[in-house]
Image: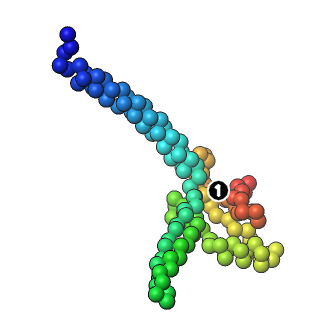
């Protein structure tokens, strides 16, 4: 003899299984976000890509212009030099011009003094000893 609730119980079991599977998947996603925030704490600067789209009407036709811009964004609010400042420094500077350097926070240092990091000619940040 079939009970009238067989379909309801079967649907409820499937729903509980789906919820458990999604809960496990979201739990792994949270762990990945923690590693991402740890990476951002160790690397305070990142490159942000800004894409803009402008529609213009030229001679009765719509023309769409799309521009892509890469901007350096840092947690401390410093946005860094622009492309032309770096270009002029590395290609037109003489030996008396100092390298592009900036200070960075060192929370693990015993005296909490800032460190110095400089941009090499290859575009790589290197810690100055």
Instruction: Check disc 1: other Cα within 10 Å, few if <14, some if 14-19, many if 20+.
Output: some
Seen at 48% across and 83% down, the residue is 61
Location of residue 24 in the rendering, given as x and y in whole percent from the top left corner:
43, 31
Residue 125, quarter of picture? bottom right
Quadrant for the C terminus, please: bottom right
SS for callout 1: strand
Seen at 72% across and 77% down, the residue is 88
- Does residue 129 appear anywhere in the picture? yes
Query: Given the current orientation, which residue lies at the most extreme bottom position?
Result: 59
Query: Given the current orientation, which residue lies at the most extreme top position?
Result: 1
Report the residue marked by disc 1.
Answer: 115
- Does residue 107 appear anywhere in the picture? no
Location of residue 16 in the rendering, given as x and y in whole percent from the top left corner:
32, 27
Q: Nearer the viewer, residue 40 or 14?
A: 14
Q: Nearer the viewer, residue 120 or 102?
A: 120
The answer to whether 98 is drawn above or below residue 127 in the figure is below
Seen at 23% across and 24% down, the residue is 8
């Amino acid at each position: 003899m079939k009970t009238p609730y067989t379909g309801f119980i079967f649907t409820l079991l499937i729903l509980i299984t789906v919820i458990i599977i999604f809960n496990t998947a979201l739990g792994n996603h949270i762990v990945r976000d923690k590693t991402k925030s740890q990476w951002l704490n160790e690397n305070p600067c990142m490159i942000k890509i800004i894409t803009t789209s402008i529609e213009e009407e030229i001679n009765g036709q719509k023309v769409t212009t799309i521009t892509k811009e890469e901007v350096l964004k840092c947690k401390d609010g410093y946005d860094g030099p622009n492309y032309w400042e770096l270009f002029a420094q590395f290609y037109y500077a003489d030996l008396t011009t100092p390298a592009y350097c900036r200070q960075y926070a060192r929370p693990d240092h015993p005296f909490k003094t800032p460190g110095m990091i400089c941009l090499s000619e290859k575009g790589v940040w290197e810690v100055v000893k």
